[in-house]
């Protein structure tokens, strides 16, 4: 994991604005952050180059998408660095898994999984989790609706508000 990059107030202001709407052009970002367009361009390029901005994507309304979303808690039978790494690598490769978190507490991992329907999720769970000898058990919670989803990282920003 790369070392955390120092983010000054201007970086945090730009990131807050980009997390709100990454389609804003340099002119609008410059006006809203009180910087020049050239400074905005340089800073955004540096944030991309340094991996702070990993990618820019469209956020879809899950309530309007077909299929189901399932939150899955996974507990291991036994743990070792190799087994944890193998599980993480598998989860990264599965298109159905859109989020995977290694967590503290009673479970080892929390996943967000998407499937066409409950039967498809059941087949996926049997294939990917039940068949894995390191998985002791998993619990599934079907998401009825998305009340709030915000992929933004909260940033302390002085003098710039994320919303107009």
Image (cartoon, rainbow, N blue to C red):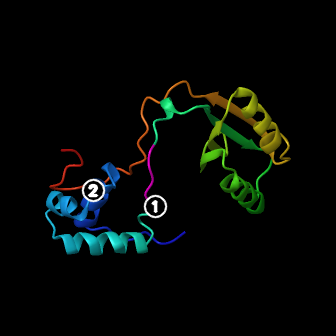
Along the line of sight, the residue nearer the viewer: 139 or 56: 56
According to the image, label 1 marks what residue?
Answer: 55
Write down the quadrant of residue 52 in the picture.
bottom left
Kindly identify the residue that appears in the image at 63 percent across and 38 percent down.
114
Frontmost of labels 2 and 1 is 2
- The residue located at (19%, 58%) in the rendering is 28
**Secondary structure state at the residue bearing disc 2:** loop
Who is closer to the viewer here, 158 or 64?
A: 64
| Label 1: which secondary element | loop
Q: Which of the two residues, 155 or 144, is positioned nearer the viewer here?
A: 144
Mark before the other along the chain sequence, 2 or 1: 2
* Residue at 26%, 68% in the rendered image: 8
Identify the residue shown where x is 31% and y is 54%. Answer: 155
Image spot of residue 127 (x, y percent): 82, 42
Report the predominant secondary structure element of the magenta stretch: loop
**124 lies left or right of 108:** right
User: Where, quadrant-wise, is the C terminus in this rendering?
Assistant: top left
Look at the image and give the residue range highlighted in magenta. 54-59
Decide if residue 7 is on the left or right side of residue 114. left
Q: Is residue 98 left or right of residue 6?
A: right
Label 1 CA crowd tier, 10 Å (few <14, some 14–19, many 20+) = few
Q: Position of residue 68 (x, y in %)?
A: 61, 31
Mark sitting on residue 24: 2
x then y, percent, for residue 152: 38, 49
């Amino acid at each position: 994991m790369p070392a955390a990059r120092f983010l000054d107030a201007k970086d945090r202001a730009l990131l807050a604005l980009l997390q709100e709407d990454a389609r804003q052009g340099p002119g609008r970002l410059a006006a809203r952050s009180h910087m020049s367009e050239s400074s905005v361009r340089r800073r955004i390029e540096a944030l991309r180059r340094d991996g702070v901005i990993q990618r820019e994507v469209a956020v879809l309304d899950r309530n309007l998408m077909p299929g189901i979303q399932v939150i899955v808690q996974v507990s291991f039978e036994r743990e070792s660095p190799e087994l944890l790494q193998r599980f993480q690598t598998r989860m990264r490769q599965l298109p159905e898994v859109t989020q995977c978190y290694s967590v503290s507490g009673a479970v080892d991992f929390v996943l967000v999984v998407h499937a066409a329907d409950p039967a498809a999720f059941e087949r996926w769970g049997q294939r990917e989790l039940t068949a894995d000898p390191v998985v002791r058990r998993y619990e599934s919670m079907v998401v009825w609706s998305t009340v709030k989803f915000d992929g933004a990282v909260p940033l302390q920003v002085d003098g710039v508000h994320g919303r107009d």
